[in-house]
Amino acid sequence: MACPPLAVNSIPPEILGEIFFRCSPSSDCIRPFKLRSNRQLDNRMKEGTAQNPLILGHVCKDWRSISRSLPLLWVTVNLHNINKSSLALLALWLEFSSSHPLNVSATITSEEVTHSALAQLFKHAARWRRLHLHIGPGVDDSVLEVVSNYHFLLLEEAMVTTAKEDPLAKEELSEHIISTSPKLTRLALPLTIDISALQTTATRQTLTMIRLETILADDLFPLLEACQHLKEFCTGFLFVRSGFLPTIRTLQLTLPDLRHFEIDLILSQDKDAPRFIDHLTLPSLTELAFPLWFGWLEHTSSLPMRWASWESLLERSGTELKVFRYIGTTLLYSDGHGDTLNKIIRSPVMRHLVHLEFLAHDRVLSTLHHTAQQHFLPDLESITITGKLIGKLSDDLIASMAVSRARASGSKLLRVDVHVEEADRNPRRQTDPGEPECSIVKFKPPADVQERLVRVDCGCIE
């Protein structure tokens, strides 16, 4: 049935097509979420933009004709929960995308229908631009061997994740992607990376972002040395073996372009592990995630990694830090966290900070509050409070800190996000016995503060 004579139908098809394209959500495949968060991964897969052109085609035959004539509407391909009807749709989808570069998000499973769909998709591997490949549980290695038959000549961004039930890294797959992707700039892998494979390919000259689940300290410096143009490096765990430091004693490494440096947790066999930072200079660093350090062999309570080495790094680099995150896991949470973060907040190298994220602690909030006439970190525009409520932290303390800073003369504070987990309050919800009990911090700022703040979000961690 033809569209009724509405005003929208008077728009020329080429203009309408441009509107369709401009209004489509972003199709980026690489997202800044942690690789080991399976819940976030599942949500990202459900968010896909792949249904957008189909919805347009359901309005009327004119819109269907226009949408099918626009290849750029069909360049995002999502292959998850595949069934037999997916095969015919995938063939049409790839046809409608013409020869344009593709953004691909796919799940590899052991089911035969998945293999058929992937066989269709891999025929177009030479025009993949962005790739998110999720390897499901129980996938046979023979399925992954199919990848070795193809090169990814246009690939710029690649993310490989694995199911929780199958934590082993598919190293051959990662190595092949690295060695056959001459334009690769952003890479995220579920475990670690083969340094020797990276050192022997031209990809090391094009990479600007690397995200790894874990890496050995022995591999960290060769990786950073090989990828001199890195702008972002993130890892969940850094393992420092005993005797590592003497191997880099004569090395001084400068990364001129690195802006974002993030390590969640350092597991160490050496009590002097923090000193590895003394061998780095990062003149462009603006965003730092400060790790926790845990002595693997001592089995002691968790200790914040010594701030002195990181402070020296920032002073030596001459950089103006804008974003600081004090992250880690509440399982390794100690009262020393508050003392360390208080020292950090008062450090001269933090004076230009714009965003601060930290694990909740009463003494830290008191420091941020300080007095109505004087506040540390005067340039702060946003604050994020996460983790588990420890000590005497209360709703009133969070509220008074935010209100005090927002009302201060010359305040730049625009946003406050509070996401905390509590075990000592009535849970807001608990849908699964295995989930942590979560509750909302009841923070509602006064009207004058609410008008000044762009956002106040008080929720719970998932």
Image: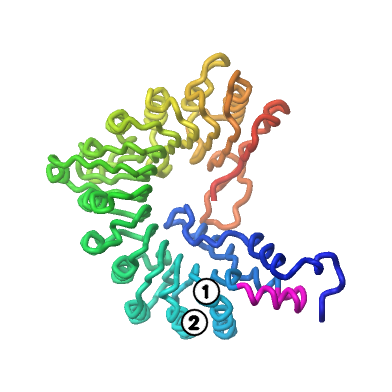
From the viewer's perspective, is residue 314 above or below residue 155? above
Residue 308 in the image: state x and y as whole percent.
Answer: 29, 29
From the viewer's perspective, is residue 119 above or below residue 194? below
Can residue 317 be seen? Answer: yes
The amino acid type found where label 1 is placed reads: Leu
The amino acid type found where label 2 is placed reads: Ala
Residue picked out by circle 2: 117
Task: Judge the density around disc 2: few (<14), some (14-19), many (≥20) Cα neighbours within 10 Å.
Answer: many
Residue 424 is drawn in which quadrant? Answer: top right
Residue 193 in the image: state x and y as whole percent.
Answer: 29, 60
The residue segment tinted magenta is: 57-70
SS state under label 2: helix
Residue 454 in the image: state x and y as whole percent.
Answer: 65, 36
Can residue 105 be seen? Answer: no
Task: Judge the density around disc 1: few (<14), some (14-19), many (≥20) Cα neighbours within 10 Å.
Answer: many
- Name the residue at the top extreme: 373
> Overall secondary structure of the magenta stretch?
helix
- Image side of residue 280 versus residue 154, left or right: left
- Pointer 2 or 1: first along the chain: 1
Residue 79: image tag? 1
SS state under label 1: strand
Task: Report, in whole angstroms, how far the alpha carbon at label 2 lies from the one at label 1.
Answer: 8 Å
- Tag count in the figure? 2
